[in-house]
Structures are given as structure tokens and as C-alpha cells.
Image (cartoon, rainbow, N blue to C red):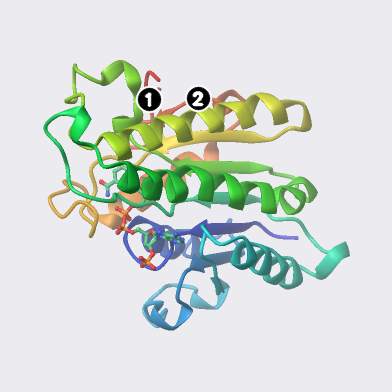
Amino acid sequence: MGFSVLVTGANRGIGLGLVRELASRSDVTKVFAGVRNPVSFPSTNEAPNKEKIQVVQLEISDQKSVDAAEHTVQQALGGSNGDGLDMLINCAGIISGPSFTRVEECDPEEFIKTLNVNVVGTHRVTVAFLPLLRRGPTKKVVNISSTLGSISELGRRYPTCHLIHYNSSKAALNSITRSYAIDFEDEGFIFFPICPGYVKTDMSPNGFLTVEESASNIANLAMKATKKYNGVFYDSVTSKIINW
Ligand code: NDP
């Protein structure tokens, strides 16, 4: 028995940072790095405890890929009578299309692309891994969201339309995370969304935080989360609750 975690979108950015951070921790024994193209996964030569990392092909918008990834992870954990997966971190996400100055400019096709990955893809992965998570003692699912998905901050801290497809995808992600939290509370699951802060990655080259800082904050919050985190939206920089 150890502590196992699967991170989606682990090829670069925050997901890759999380894989490296989690593998460096003594309380984590196995890290599955879910990536679309395993050949392009950066060398783990420099990662501490790289032997804990297993790269798994995972395109979250493709059901066959998700099912195959679930099978691979299950086999690595000992097969149908083996261990469960302790934690799933849904980190894969996109911003599709340009930003806007008015809401009516939002392109429906770009909207669909964004929702398909950020919301439907996350849901697809979660459903597929529920049986393995159920088998583990920890039963944690962390969805990487954003304060841009906070409806109460729209028009106050943030403009109403700037990245409307992305903002609304994260609002929808928050909503389904809370639905999972409610439906699975009786089974002892902990489902919660985390905002990683403004992080310097390909998605946001002007971010203030380094990937390493953000990954460390997220991992700290995710590892220490208890039942009271279920269905609550957290900021991993301040460890404070964010209003929906
Ligand atoms: P990056 O663009 O740097 O990385 C995104 C990752 O998601 C890549 O590994 C990419 O894989 C993967 N990905 C995209 N689409 C899919 C898919 N369909 N299936 C599987 N993997 C996919 O972004 P960040 O690291 O910045 O963002 C990570 C998460 O954090 C996202 O959910 C984002 O919304 C969230 N976030 C980021 C913030 C920031 O400031 N950076 C702020 C708030 C939230 P590939 O390399 O193959 O393209």
C-alpha cells in the first residue's frame, strides 16, 4: 500500500510541475502522468524520484483513450484485485480562441471546444476513474479551476466578457465539482476545485507565480484536504475559500 495519484494534462505547465512535485514527496509512492503524447513527455531525468513516475497516454476528449488509461493505471496498481487510486488531479485545460471585448463576439465553435475539454473531458475522466478511486482509502478528486470561473467576481474583479468561453467553462467545472461533492459525500469522497493563482505557463506567459511555486501550493492543499474541503472552492495561493 502506498499513495498513488493521477495528474491529467501532465505534459507541460502546472500538470508537469505537479507530477515532479508529487514525486518528490515521501508521502507519495506513485505518480501517473496523463499526457496526450507520451513521446513528447519531457525527460524525467531531472525529476527527483523519477522511478515513481509512470507516463500514461491520456487524451481527455477521447473516450477510448480515457478507458485505455484507466486500464493501464489499474494494471499498474495490481489489477482487478489490486490497490485503488488515491487521488485524481484533473489539470488538463485549454483556452480556445481569442479574448473578446463584448460577450456577443464569443464564437460558438470555440465555445464548444473549450467546454468539451475543460468540462466534458474532466467529467469523462472522473467517471472512468471512479471505480479505482472508490477502491482506495483516500478518494480525493481535485479539479484545477480558476477564479475566472467565479460568477460573483464577474464585473467586479474581472471583466464580464474577456475570456467568456474559458470563464464559463470554469464556472461549469465548479458546478459539476460541487455536484460530485454532494453525490459522493456519503461514500467518503472529497471533491473540490482549486485555483492555482496566476502562473507563468504557455497558457499565461505573464503569470506571477512559477510552475514550481504553484505546484507546491496545490500539492500542499490537495494532500492536507480533509472532509471539510468537499464541495468548497479554494485558492491554493492563500489557502482561502473563493466565492462561487
Ligand atoms: P498549459 O497550456 O501550459 O498546459 C495545458 C496542459 O493541458 C498541457 O499539458 C496540454 O497537453 C493539456 N491538455 C490540453 N488539452 C488536453 C486534452 N484534450 N487532453 C489531455 N490533455 C490536454 O496550461 P497551464 O499549465 O497553465 O494550465 C493547467 C490548468 O490550470 C488548466 O486547467 C488551466 O485552466 C488552469 N489554470 C491555469 C492558470 C494559469 O495562470 N496558468 C490560472 C488558473 C487556472 P499538450 O501538451 O498535449 O497540449
Dividing the image into four quarters, tell me where ligand 1 lies: bottom left
**Where is residue 18 shown, x and y percent of the image?**
42, 57
Identify the disc placed on residue 175: none
Query: Which quadrant: the C terminus?
Result: top left
From the image, which quarter does the N terminus lie in? bottom right
- Residue 30 in the image: above or below residue 150: below
Q: Secondary structure at mark 1?
A: loop
Numbered disc 2: secondary structure: loop
* CA neighbours of label 1 inside 10 A, class few (<14), some (14 to 19), many (20+): few
Residue lying farthest right?
81
Q: In the rendered structure, find residue 240 and report the number of the disc placed on it.
A: 1
Camera-side mark, 1 or 2: 2
User: What is the three-letter code of the residue carrying label 2?
Assistant: Val
Q: Which of the pair 151/27 is nearer the observer?
A: 151
- Residue visible at 16% across and 25% down? 159
Q: Which mark is residue 232?
A: 2
Answer left or right for 90 relative to 44.
right
Q: CA distance from mark 1 to mark 2?
A: 10 Å
Residue drawn at x 43%, y 46% as measured from the top left: 118
Q: Is residue 36 visible?
A: yes
Residue 235 visible, this angle = no
Disc 1 vs disc 2: Cβ atoms closer than 8 Å? no
Give the class, few, some or many, for how many residues have Cα within 10 Å of label 2's Cα (few <14, many ≥20).
many
Q: In terms of depth relative to the viewer, which is nearer, 87 or 9?
A: 9
Using the image as rendered, state which of residue 82 and residue 158 is in the foreground: 158
Q: Residue at x 71, y 72 (%)?
A: 76
Residue 88, given in percent of the width and then of the height, sits at 58, 51
Q: Position of residue 180 (x, y in %)?
A: 63, 32
